Image (tube, grey):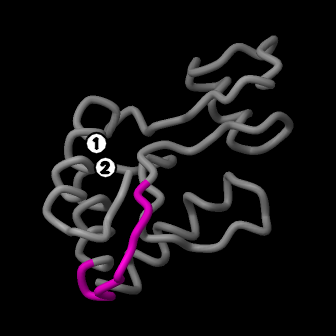
Amino acid sequence: MVDAVLDGLVVGLSYLLPEVGPDPGLLGGPGEDRASVDASFALAEALCPEALKIAVSVRIYPGTAMARLAVREAVISPADDLLAPVFYTSEAARDWLPQRARDEARSHPGWRL
């Protein structure tokens, strides 16, 4: 299960800048759904971190694969300059992920949004 979670994180992170590494607290990227969120939180629990920063969306930077995906999914317009932060959350997770992350953070003393 851990291998599947890490594979999913790597796929999602391929849309970001290349220097970003896997992070079980980064949620909402391309393809994120209930099963992958469950697996990410299970991995985080198994790692027992003293602190974990949970992000429920991914910032869209100009000229990246994430920006191109966001245009295809009509999250942003090709004309958007992205100087002000704009964030992407997988369509499958948009409605429920923020509350799930809040609930998880409340139940783990060192976890923060």
- The image quarter in which residue 65 lies: top right
Furthest residue toward front = 109
The type of residue carrying mark 2 is Asp
Q: Nearer the viewer, residue 63 or 44?
A: 44
Check if mark 1's residue and mark 2's residue have beta carbons within 8 Å.
no
Q: Which mark is residue 97?
A: 1
Position of residue 111 relative to residue 71, above or below, is: below
Residue drawn at x 34%, y 32% as measured from the top left = 94
* Residue at the image point whose x is 45% and y is 51% from the top: 55
Rendered position, 6 above or below 109: below
User: Mark 1: which amino acid?
Assistant: Leu
| Residue 33 marker | 2
Which segment is the magenta one? 45-54
| Residue neighbourhood size for the residue with mark 2, other residues' Cα within 10 Å, grouped as few (<14), some (14–19), many (≥20) | some
Instruction: Looking at the picture, tell me which residue is in the foreground, 95 or 51.
Output: 51
Image: 48 above or below 80:
below
